[in-house]
Structure formats: C-alpha cells, structure tokens
Image: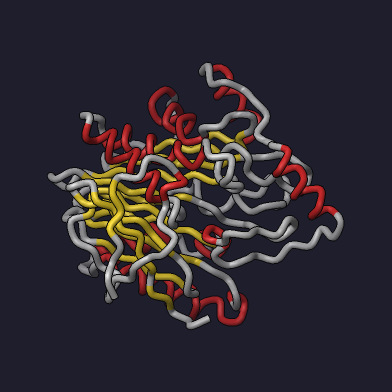
C-alpha cells in the first residue's frame, strides 16, 4: 500500500487521520522515528532542533516534550491519567550511543519528565532517580512545579473509582473517543534519532498505565526495556503493556539481534514472537509493539495486534505515518 506524505507538522493537531502501510514495515533513510500517530508532531520538533544545529540529545528531548505538554494526551506528561490513588506520576529515560543515560520514575509535579531525566544524566553521578527523590531533584534544579491532574483527568479517575476495574486496552493511543474509566494504559512515546554519520540517541516518556497501583513502574524508563541505543548498531524502543516488555528486556533484545546481523525489521519480529511464545494465553488481547532504527536509517516495526502506528521522518523533513505489521490478526 502507499504512504501518506506528511509535511513538517507544527503540533499534535496536525497528525494524519489515515496511515499508510509499508509492505515490509521497512523505511530507509529515517532521521527521526517515533511511536504512534502523535509521534509526527514530536518528530517535527526533533527534526527542527537538528536543523538548527542541536545535538541528538537536544533533538530527542525537544520531540518528547511535545506530547508531554499536550493536555489532550492523557498518558504522557501534563494531564496524564493518575494512579488509583489520584496521583499523576511520570516516567522517562533519555540515552545516547556514548553510554549517556538519565532516567526518572514516579516523578510528580513536573511537566517535562524527559528534561529532568536529561539533568540526571548530565548533572548527577547516577542514571536513575525515583519517587520523592526524583521530584525533589526536579524542584532543586529549578523546574516549575505544578499539579499535573487536570479537571478532565480527575473526572475520568473519579469515574473509574465507581468500579475500580482495570483491563488493558490495546491501541488506546489512537482511539479518538475514550471512555472515562477505561484503562487507557500506555500512551508512551518512544523516539529515536540519528545523524548522517550514524550517531544515535533516543528518548521515552509516559505517565504509565491509567489508574495503576501506586508506585508501579513499567518498561518506559528502564534502559534495555523501553529504550536502548548502541553505537555502531542502532536503537530500539517499545510501547504497549510494559510488564510484557520488561520480562524480556525487549529493546535491548532487539538491538542485540541487530548486532548479530538481523535487520531492524527481523529484530522487531523476533522479540514479538518470543513474547508470544513465552507468555501464550497470558498475552491474549494485549498490545506490545517495537520500533528499531539502525545507523543507516533502516526502520523496523512489529507488534502483537493490529493497530500500532509509527511516524518516520526522512532527511528532507518529510514525515510518514505508517501501520506496523502484526503477529496476530486481532
């Protein structure tokens, strides 16, 4: 099938409504790659930052900040759905191919978790801060403190409290009409970027599963699960139900397959098939998807269930939103 051109979107509202499908889910020459339709706006911000001379870390941070600040996106950053106790908590990781890593989990009262993660990488001897310590670090670093629970998100949470029932909902990222109280569980954005000489960086940010248990952390901020980047090989990121990704260190597994000679597409397919074989009926109705990008700009994408989309931006700044092939039909 054909692809749909997408010319430098300026914001989340510019995302395509329809998506093309590459026959083999491969796209060559990618400069920026990200999960879901709303990744197109994130790609635009990342590409613009690179075009102005920014570093790869600058670019992936700029891209991740777009959905973090979008009040209509209820599982990334500001306006994210809270945990079952009513607290909005954020997780994020940023990574380059020189071993630079910063991550935060269960961060509160700070919109841009990805920027706090970058400060962890650049200004501390650590790679990961969590909970109250992460929130205090953000405050001490001068990040504006504000409540992340918007009236709309609070209303959804109070609606959920009537039943307190949790059931993951596949592909909730692209659902136009969302039912308050539904488990809108994984609006993660994972983003990868590369330069012409093959250097790479990545970012991943989320507010995690809606109405999760207090203290729950998924795959997103964990290096090797939600994100992994390796010099001379490439990078990978994941989306979906994070518990299934962490069981297999999913993104690191993808990159390891690429290091062993697999294409990005083959590597994504291998890990998805492995999860299905390992978990059997336990992953019935569960969505997990992977994206991979190698140093030459070749792309891989694969998922358990139909519906996972991703955004690819080439060196000209043209973005396409594509549908990933899936292991199962439904």
Numbered circles on residues, count: 0
Residue at image point 25% right, 45% down: 200
Q: Position of residue 69 (x, y in %)?
A: 52, 36
Residue at image point 63% right, 43% down: 80
- Asked if residue 306 is positioned above or below residue 107 in the image, the reply reads below
Q: Which residue lies most toward the left here?
A: 197
Q: Quadrant of residue 98?
A: top left
- Asked if residue 272 is positioned above or below residue 16 in the image, the reply reads below
Q: Position of residue 291 (x, y in %)?
A: 36, 60
Task: Looking at the picture, tell me which residue is in the foreground, 323 or 291.
Answer: 323
Q: Position of residue 59 (x, y in %)?
A: 31, 36
Q: Quadrant of residue 107?
A: top right
Residue at image point 65% right, 34% down: 148
Task: Looking at the picture, tell me which residue is in the foreground, 157 or 101.
Answer: 157
Task: Looking at the picture, tell me which residue is in the foreground, 47 or 244.
Answer: 47
Screen quadrant of the N terminus: bottom left
Color style of the picture: secondary structure
Task: Looking at the picture, tell me which residue is in the foreground, 112 or 316.
Answer: 316
In the rendered structure, the answer to whether residue 85 lies left or right of residue 284 reads right
Q: Position of residue 262 (x, y in %)?
A: 24, 69
Q: Which residue lies most toward the right here?
A: 162
In the rendered structure, the answer to whether residue 70 lies left or right of residue 325 reads right
- Asked if residue 256 is positioned above or below residue 276 in the image, the reply reads above
């Amino acid at each position: 099938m054909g692809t749909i051109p997408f010319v430098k979107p300026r914001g989340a509202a510019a995302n395509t409504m329809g998506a093309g499908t590459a026959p083999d889910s491969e796209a060559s020459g990618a400069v920026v790659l990200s999960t879901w339709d709303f990744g197109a706006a994130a790609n635009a911000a990342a590409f613009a930052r690179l075009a102005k001379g920014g570093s790869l870390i600058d670019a992936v941070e700029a891209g991740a900040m777009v959905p973090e600040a979008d009040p209509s996106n209820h599982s990334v950053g500001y306006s994210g759905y809270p945990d079952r106790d009513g607290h909005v908590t954020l997780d994020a990781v940023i990574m380059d191919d020189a071993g630079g890593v910063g991550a935060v989990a269960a961060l509160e009262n700070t919109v841009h978790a990805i920027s706090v993660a970058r400060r962890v990488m650049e200004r501390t001897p650590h790679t990961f801060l969590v909970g109250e310590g992460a929130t205090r670090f953000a405050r001490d670093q001068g990040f504006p403190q504000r409540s992340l629970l918007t009236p709309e998100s609070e209303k959804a949470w109070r609606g959920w409290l009537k039943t307190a029932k949790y059931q993951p909902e596949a592909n909730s990222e692209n659902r136009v009409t969302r039912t308050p109280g539904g488990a809108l569980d994984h609006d993660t954005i994972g983003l990868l970027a590369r330069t012409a000489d093959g250097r790479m960086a990545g970012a991943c940010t989320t507010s995690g599963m809606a109405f999760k248990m207090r203290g729950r952390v998924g795959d997103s901020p964990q290096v090797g699960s939600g994100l992994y980047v390796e010099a001379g090989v490439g990078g990978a990121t994941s989306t979906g139900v994070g518990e299934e990704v962490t069981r297999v260190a999913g993104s690191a597994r993808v990159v390891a397959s690429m290091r062993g000679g697999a294409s990005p597409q083959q590597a994504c397919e291998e890990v998805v098939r492995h999860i299905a074989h390992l978990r059997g009926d336990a992953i019935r109705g569960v969505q997990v998807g992977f994206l991979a990008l190698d140093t030459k700009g070749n792309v891989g994408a694969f998922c358990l269930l139909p519906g996972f989309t991703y955004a690819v931006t080439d060196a000209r700044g043209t973005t396409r939103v594509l549908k990933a092939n899936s292991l199962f039909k439904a």
